Image: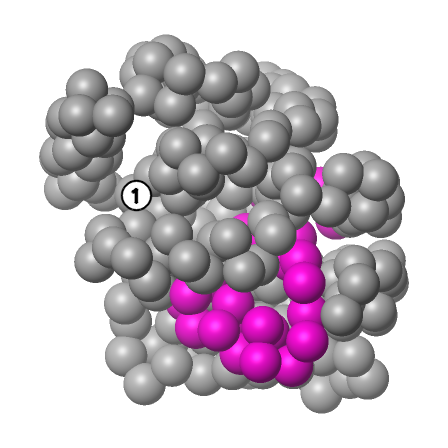
Amino acid sequence: MAAGPDTYLVLIPSYEPGARLAGTVADALCRWPHVWLVIDGGDDDSGVESQDGLRVIRRARNGGKGAAVLEGVRAAVLEGFTHALVMDADGQHPAAEIGRFIEISMRNPSSMILGVPIFDASAPRVRVLGRRISNVLARLEARRGIGDALFGFRVYPLRRLLMVMEASRHMRRYDFDTEAVVRLCWEGVPVVNVPAAVRYFSVAEGGVSHFRYGRDNLLLAAMHLRLICGALCR
């Protein structure tokens, strides 16, 4: 099936994202007719109402962001979708940019469209500094001009993404965003970088983060070591 508006969907992986989930889903549905929500083993979706255009996939147990994306991608490919805009469930990503990103993708269907975050004062300084290091490493590993390897607001060609994910047992948790981009670059998938605003919500504003600095930074360090070795072998 040729790429077109009806072959694109918005894919939202979700694991107990808090009170902002319902608003995120509603905002996405206002801007695109096909929205899939993948509940990754949690039950924090009570505020999400059944609506036209919304499909909810529930996983029996939590497997991580990448695992939730993979389940959605497999199902989407079977139903004839060619591309997916992936966005987080916690309201940080700009739903207002959905249409623009998909339009850019339709002009560049073989490419992945990577959001490049524009931070405001809400961004934790330690997260901003940490991602700079990760981005430098990802550019070296991919040998490509990746604008940002960690920002999860992006459009993927689904079959290419499915191919690299099914070829590896990695990319199932927080290592998904970076490793998927690097491996897609290795497969020759072009990159289009597009700036987009991002907002971090405080706990008082309903913000939720499942990132654990010790555990997940170790996961990312192991990922970069794996990718550096892979880049050297190539």
Residue corresponding to mark 1: 175
Q: Quadrant of residue 40?
A: bottom left
Residue 170 visible here: yes
Residue 101 visible here: no
Disc 1 crowd rating (10 Å Cα; few below 14, some 14-19, many 20+) is many
Q: Which residue occupies the foreground of this view, 201 or 187? A: 187
* Residue in the picture at 82% in, 84% down: 52
Quarter occupied by the C terminus: top left
Rendered location of residue 41, percent (x, y): 34, 77
What residue span does the magenta drawing correspond to? 68-96
* Residue in the picture at 34% in, 14% down: 140
**How many marks do you count on the picture?**
1
Rendered location of residue 173, percent (x, y): 29, 53
Rendered location of residue 87, percent (x, y): 59, 51
The kind of secondary structure element at disc 1 is loop
* Residue in the picture at 30% in, 51% down: 171
> In the rendered view, does 64 fall on the left or right side of 97?
left
Q: Which residue occupies the foreground of this view, 105 or 130? A: 105
Q: Quadrant of residue 193?
A: top right
